[in-house]
Structures are given as structure tokens and as C-alpha cells.
Image: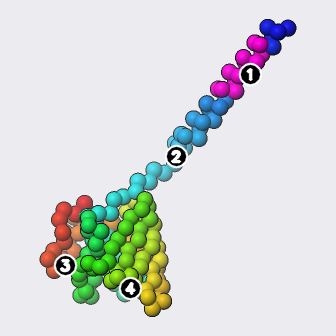
Amino acid sequence: MKCKNTRLIKVALICFAVVLSMSTFAQNTPHPHARKSAIPILAETVWSVYESDEKANSYFYFMPDGTLQTHFPYGVVGVHEVGIWKQDGNAIYINMNNKFAEYHGLIEEDFMGGKAANVNGHTWNWHAYKLSQAVVQKLPEPSGGWPKPVK
């Protein structure tokens, strides 16, 4: 009788181990149709930005040092030296003119968007699309040109 119980216990333990390993494998294996979304690195990229309270798109160049160069079709061009951009995974934070305006958003591949607000309490939505180097080369250049290379 003791031999049958020992054998039964061994079989039960083996079955338990197999089920446990299958469960762990299933949890760590992505679904074959799951969308693979890489988080882009923003440094040295140019994005076409639409803000819900503006009449024209602007362009943001994410400098490698964390500053942001902007180009607005209606004439305001410059590097916001006191402004910054920070990326944390797929989250983006932009602060312009010493926090006069702050942008918060999420990045997904070649698209980002979110909400912004300024110190006067004005809020708006924004979104942006990453531009290819071929498109960037066709843009009117800001004074001094776009920093190179553009990825």
C-alpha cells in the first residue's frame, strides 16, 4: 500500500510541476497577434504639432541636450533655452519658457498627444506626428537651419 501511495504522490507532483510550468510559460509569452509597440527615442527628431487653440501647425525639434527648438509658420522661431523636454518611457513632458506652458502626453510609435496648460489657466489639447528626414528637408528652415543629423 505504501508503494502505491508513493507512486501516486510522485505522479501528482510531476503533473503539478508540468501545469505550473505551462502556466508560467503562457504568462510570459506574448499573444501572437499582439501589437508590438516600440517606444521611440525623441532626441534629434522633428514632429509636426497641432494644438487645438492654434490655426496652424508648428514643428518641434527635440534637441539631444533636452532643449526644444520650435518653428511656427507664422514667424516665431527659437530655442527655448529655459524650456525642457523629458521622456520617461512612453510619457513626454515639455516645459516652455520657464513653465509658462507645460505639455503632458503619451508617445506611441510616430504619434504623441496629450494636454497642455499655461500659467494663465488656459488649457488645450495637442498631438504630433513624427516627420521623416525627407519631409524635414522640405520644411522652411528656421534661422540657422535644423540641427543635424535628423533621425
Q: Which residue is mark 1?
A: 12
Q: Which residues are magenta?
A: 6-18
Residue at position x 33%, y 73% in the image: 84
Q: Which mark is residue 87?
A: none
Which type of secondary structure does the marked residue at label 3 adopt? loop
**How much space separates mark 1 and mark 2, taking CA atoms?**
35 Å
Q: Which residue is mark 4?
A: 100
Residue 139 position, x and y percent, is 21, 74
Left of 28 or right of it: where is 14?
right
Residue 37 location, quadrant:
bottom left
Of circles 4 and 3, the one toward us is 4
Q: Which mark is residue 142?
A: 3
Give the mark nearer the N terminus: 1 vs 2: 1
Give the mark nearer the N terminus: 4 vs 3: 4
- In the image, is residue 12 part of the stretch drawn in magenta? yes
Q: Is residue 56 visible?
A: yes
Residue 104 position, x and y percent, is 45, 73
Q: Which residue is mark 2?
A: 33
| Quarter of the figure that contains the N terminus | top right
Residue 108 location, quadrant:
bottom left
Residue type for callout 3: Pro
Which type of secondary structure does the marked residue at label 1 adopt? helix
Left of 50 or right of it: where is 123?
right
